[in-house]
């Protein structure tokens, strides 16, 4: 099992939860490759015993880190599982994340924690993996990563690489697997978050649950709209949700779900100011 981690922080800071995460996976990983666009020397020394470290120019967003990380894999043809994740989320308990994730690996393919159908169906690229030698040694895998060039426009990266990657592998008969399964109660939980001012009627509910129309809720970003489910199942939460909260979720509840140690990890990751502003509702 091989890990490739894409790290970005404009000040070169490395959050404690990432250090803990890397230490955890180093115990069972064959190789851990940490790729960053900026990392202070003090953190390089901390990570050195647990990972191979590559500092690269700040171009191409996370996908360029993933690509360069792949080039550092020793004997990639022998790899059975390559997991890629970035620094856009906080993981409070890596053991919980991998216990839940690994139990879903039952056939070769591309896996991810979550998917979205906007603008097209795709696995979200903050945490995903390629499972099985048949996938990793396939022409589709080699051509996808081998033909990649750096793109430095965020929207174009999402469209071409995050969305495009899933479309590419689907087109080449490599199955996509989402490990987070949504129940009816999960879908119902989205409704008050998204449609606060719309009166639901029988026709609308019937339309929502009609199998041919499931893309209605799948187009939503569940790392925001179902953040509590992802936290409960995998012990993770997206930093964008905590710092910017673009979908106006009620995230103050998170503070009461964390123990003191986890709150300290969160403050270290997003800063005392953001923690107080969004999770304590203090005026800054």
Image (cartoon, rainbow, N blue to C red):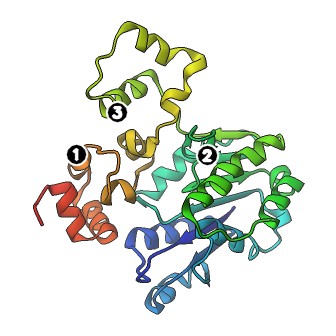
Q: Which residue is mark 3?
A: 194
Which numbered disc, 1 or 3, marks the residue closer to the eye?
A: 3
* Residue found 34% across the figure and 45% down from its top: 247
Which quadrant would the N terminus be assigned to in this image? Answer: bottom right
Tell me the element at label 1.
Answer: helix
Front residue of this view, candidates 65 and 72: 65
Residue 141 coordinates in the image, percent (x, y): 81, 56
Ranked by sequence position, the earlier of labels 1 and 3 is: 3
* Residue found 56% across the figure and 58% down from its top: 155
**Residue 122 vs residue 93: left or right?**
right
Tell me the element at label 2.
Answer: strand
Which numbered disc, 3 or 2, marks the residue closer to the eye?
A: 3
Residue 49 coordinates in the image, percent (x, y): 56, 83
Q: Which residue is mark 2?
A: 123
Q: Which residue is mark 1?
A: 253
Asked if the residues shown at circle 2 and circle 1 are in contact, with their CB atoms under 8 angstroms apart, the answer is no
136, above or below 114, in the image: below
Determine the CA span between mark 3 and mark 2.
22 Å
Determine the CA span between mark 2 and mark 1.
27 Å
Ranked by sequence position, the earlier of labels 3 and 2 is: 2
Residue 138 in view, yes or no: no
269, above or below 82, in the image: below
Determine the CA span between mark 1 and mark 3.
17 Å
* Residue found 44% across the figure and 76% down from its top: 9
Residue at the extreme top? 202
């Amino acid at each position: 099992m091989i890990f490739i981690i894409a790290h970005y922080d404009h000040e070169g800071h490395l959050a404690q939860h990432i250090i803990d995460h890397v230490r955890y996976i180093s115990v069972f990983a064959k190789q851990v490759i940490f790729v960053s666009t900026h990392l202070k020397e003090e953190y390089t020394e901390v990570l050195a015993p647990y990972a191979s470290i590559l500092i690269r120019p700040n171009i191409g967003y996370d996908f360029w880190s993933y690509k360069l990380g792949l080039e550092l894999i020793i004997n990639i043809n022998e790899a059975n599982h390559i997991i890629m994740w970035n620094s856009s989320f906080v993981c409070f308990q890596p053991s919980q994340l991998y216990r839940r994730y690994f139990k879903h690996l039952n056939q070769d393919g591309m896996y991810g924690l979550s998917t979205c159908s906007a603008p097209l169906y795709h696995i979200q690229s903050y945490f995903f993996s390629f499972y099985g030698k048949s996938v990793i040694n396939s022409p589709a895998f080699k051509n996808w990563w081998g033909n990649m060039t750096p793109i430095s426009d965020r929207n174009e990266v999402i469209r071409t690489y995050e969305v495009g990657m899933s479309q590419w592998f689907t087109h080449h008969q490599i199955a996509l697997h989402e490990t987070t399964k949504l129940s009816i109660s999960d879908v119902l939980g989205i409704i008050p978050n998204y449609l606060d001012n719309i009166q639901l009627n029988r026709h609308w509910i019937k339309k929502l649950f009609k199998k041919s129309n499931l893309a209605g809720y799948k187009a939503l970003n569940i790392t925001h709209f179902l953040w509590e489910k992802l936290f409960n199942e995998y012990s993770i939460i997206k930093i964008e949700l905590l710092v910017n909260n673009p979908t106006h979720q009620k995230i103050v509840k998170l503070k009461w779900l964390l123990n003191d140690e986890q709150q300290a990890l969160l403050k270290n990751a997003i800063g005392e100011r953001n923690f107080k502003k969004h999770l304590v509702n203090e005026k800054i």
